[in-house]
Image: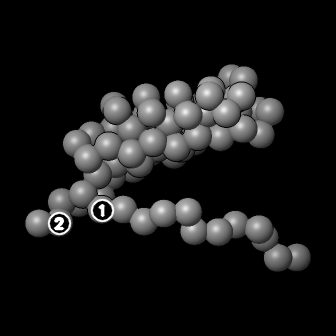
């Protein structure tokens, strides 16, 4: 069975966070400095899409590329 995943975006010099809700809504956020704003943006995005009980499922940062 094939999955239905696809590449949504690429990034560097920053942090990305993804949130997921039990009612299958999601959100993601990016910040060029650290994880705090990336997490806040992802949680807000999840809630704005109708997520009920959004939780963090992934947060990571790239190394700095000049």
Q: Is residue 34 left or right of residue 2?
A: left
Count neighbours of disc 2 (C-alpha within 10 A) and say few if under 14, some if 14 to 19, many if 20 or more.
Answer: few
Helix, strand or loop under label 1: loop
Q: So how many labels did they put on this image?
A: 2
Q: In which image quadrant can residue 24 be found?
A: top right
Residue lying at the far right of the rendered structure: 1
Q: Is residue 18 left or right of residue 31?
A: right
Residue 44: percent from left, percent from top? 53, 28
Q: Is residue 38 left or right of residue 58?
A: left
Q: Are marks 2 and 1 in contact (CB under 8 Å)?
A: yes
Residue beneath disc 1: 12
Residue beneath disc 2: 65
Identify whether 13 is placed above or below 15. below
Residue 34: percent from left, percent from top? 27, 40
Residue lying at the far front of the rendered structure: 48
Closer to the camera, 58 or 23?
A: 23
* Residue 20 visible in this rendered orientation of the protein: no
Residue lying at the far top of the rendered structure: 53
Q: Residue at x 78, y 70 (%)?
A: 3
Q: Could you tell me how far apart the alpha carbons at marks 2 and 1 are, in whole angstroms?
A: 7 Å
Q: Residue at x 61, y 33 (%)?
A: 46
* Residue 37 visible in this rendered orientation of the protein: yes
Identify whether 61 is placed above or below 51. below
Considering the image in quadrants, where does the C terminus appear?
bottom left
Closer to the camera, 8 or 62?
A: 8
Q: Residue at x 39, y 38 (%)?
A: 38
Q: In which image quadrant can residue 29 be found?
A: top left
Residue 28: percent from left, percent from top? 52, 43
Which color scheme does this rendered protein use? Answer: one colour
């Amino acid at each position: 069975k094939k999955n239905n995943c696809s590449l949504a975006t690429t990034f560097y010099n920053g942090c990305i966070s993804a949130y997921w809700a039990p009612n299958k809504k999601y959100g993601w956020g990016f910040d060029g400095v650290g994880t705090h704003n990336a997490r806040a943006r992802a949680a807000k995005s999840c809630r704005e899409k109708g997520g009920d009980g959004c939780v963090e499922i992934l947060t990571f940062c790239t190394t700095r590329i000049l």
